[in-house]
Amino acid sequence: MRLLRQPKPLRFAAILGLAVALVFTGCTRDAPKNSAPPPPSPSPASSFAPGAPPPSPPGGQAVPPPGQPTSATDKWGVVPEAWPLDGSLHMDELGKQIDQALAEGAKPLELYRVSEYAVAILEQIEFDADTTLVDFGTGTGVFTVALLQSGRPFKKLYAVDVIEPVLKLQQMVLDKTRLEGREKVEMVASRWDDAKLPPESADLILKINVPLNIGPSIEASSGFLANPKDPQLLCMRSLVKAMRPDAELHDYFGLAEDGRDFTPKAQELLQKFYQAAGLRKVSLTMGPLWFDHHNQRTNLDHMHGVYVRVDKTGR
């Protein structure tokens, strides 16, 4: 099964602010007692590509008052894409804001501060009513809501994240919006070294703006290259085990400065990571990325990698 359409230019909105502060959001959770701690959060210099967007500032973004625009095109925007680190988000208050926005006529996607990138990705990927999807590092559910609001048929969606409060928030959004098809969405609380998905359950995995910590220096052989038990690598291997033989993994990431810092060395390390996890590159492209914030538009790039499982012959 081939799921990739011909690439189209993506029109992302404020995507550079969406890079998650945790490394490998789908897997990096608080370690259980008597186990090794999760890897440290990457600095901008040690994220999976030099020049990749830095993590959100400590404290995240506070939830705006109901009805207050957060951009020129955003009337409601009460739901952030990621859980704020300073604890400023309160579920009860946010639930009231969601209720008010819906009462004022907000569509489900309009509840989110940024949603255009999820719609753009949906326009790129091909799937049908028999497809089981995985949103790895799902956050508060903007892709889930975009998928359901689009009305496109699918079999099941696993929404995977290591931060359990964001899964609870995503479920609250689905319950309040009563989107058709929400019963086909399963929330999965992953571990920092395990995606916690059933074996060979997925046809299409989407990994959107999830940075990879390659170590203190792009030139250093550290991190997963030096440690075969690196939690990121173990987590990716568990994700590969969840892929059916003909499944695809699509990796999307916003790049700063037209992607010119995504050096050959960075690309080499990225491919080594996926190879070590048991994946083979089908394509790796960079294309136009639109940043739209307070009427300011800047042409940037995004990376889109497509990967498949290595078969028993190593191909």
Image (spheres, grey):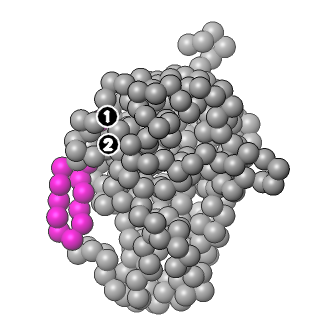
Q: Which residue is mark 2?
A: 51
**The quarter of the displayed image where residue 72 is located:** bottom left
Q: Main secondary structure of the magenta part?
A: strand
Pointer 2 local density, CA inside 10 Å: few below 14, some 14–19, many at least 20: many
Q: Is residue 135 visible?
A: no
SS class of the residue under badge 1?
Answer: loop
Q: Which mark is residue 115?
A: none
Image coordinates of residue 301 in percent, x first then y, are 26, 43
User: Looking at the image, is 48 positioned above or below residue 1?
Assistant: below
Are discs 2 and 1 less than 8 Å apart at CB? yes
**The quarter of the displayed image where residue 236 is located:** top right
> Residue at horizontal 82%, vertical 50%?
34
* Residue 6 falls within the magenta-colored stretch: no
Q: Earlier in the sequence, mark 2 or mark 1?
A: 2
Image coordinates of residue 207 in percent, x first then y, are 50, 45
Image coordinates of residue 102 in percent, x first then y, are 46, 84
Task: Identify the amino acid type marked 2.
Answer: Gly
Q: Which residue is mark 1?
A: 262
Left or right of 162 in this view: 69: left
Task: Provide the residue span drawn in magenta.
Answer: 286-299
SS class of the residue under badge 2?
Answer: loop
User: Looking at the image, is 273 positioned above or below residue 95?
Assistant: above
Q: What is the quadrant of the N terminus in the image?
A: top right
> Residue at horizontal 41%, vertical 27%?
219
